[in-house]
Amino acid sequence: IVAALRAVPGARVRVWRRLDAPEGAAATPAPSAEVLAALCAGVEASMASRLAVIAGPAGVDLVPYASDDAG
């Protein structure tokens, strides 16, 4: 996922590791080429300046977000 997203023009990628996964849980399966292509297309088409890609056992979600930090 990271390599595919880094290939998207203008995308900056930061990787965060989840700490709440149940112990002994199966690793998130690698997405198919079609899922990666759709994810990258979604990133390119998005008007949001910040997007989170959440990968889990059920698949990959692309979530626009904004920081509420006032400083």
Image (spheres, helix red, strand yellow):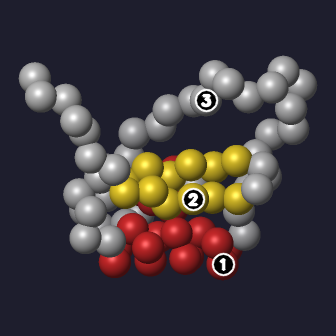
Give SS at disc 1: helix
Q: Which residue is at a point 29% across and 67% down the rendered structure image?
A: 9
Q: Amino acid at mark 2?
A: Asp
Q: Earlier in the sequence, mark 1 or mark 2?
A: 1
Q: Is residue 47 above or below residue 67?
A: below
Give SS at disc 2: strand
Q: Which residue is at a point 32% across and 71% down the rendered structure image?
A: 46
Q: Residues within 10 Å of mark 2 (few under 14, many from 20)?
A: few
| Residue of label 3 | 18
On the image, the x and y values in percent for residue 71 come to 10, 23
Q: 1 or 28: nearer the eye?
A: 28
- Label 2 and label 3: CA atoms lie apart by 14 Å
Q: Which residue is at a point 12% across and 28% down the rendered structure image?
A: 70
Mark 3 against mark 1, which lies toward the viewer? 3
Q: Which of the 4 image quadrants contains residue 20?
A: top right
Q: Confirm or deny contact between disc 2 and disc 3 (CB under 8 A).
A: no
Mark 1 against mark 2, which lies toward the viewer? 2
Looking at the image, residue 16 sits to the left or right of residue 49; the answer is right
Q: Is residue 69 above or below residue 27?
A: above
On the image, the x and y values in percent for residue 56 come to 70, 47
Q: Amino acid at mark 1?
A: Glu
Q: Amino acid at mark 3?
A: Arg
Q: Which residue is at a point 56% across and 49% down the rendered structure image?
A: 54
| Residue of label 2 | 61
On the image, the x and y values in percent for residue 30 come to 74, 56
- Label 3 and label 1: CA atoms lie apart by 24 Å
Quadrant where the N terminus sits is: bottom right
Circle on res. 34: 1
Q: Earlier in the sequence, mark 3 or mark 1?
A: 3
Q: Residues within 10 Å of mark 3 (few under 14, many from 20)?
A: few
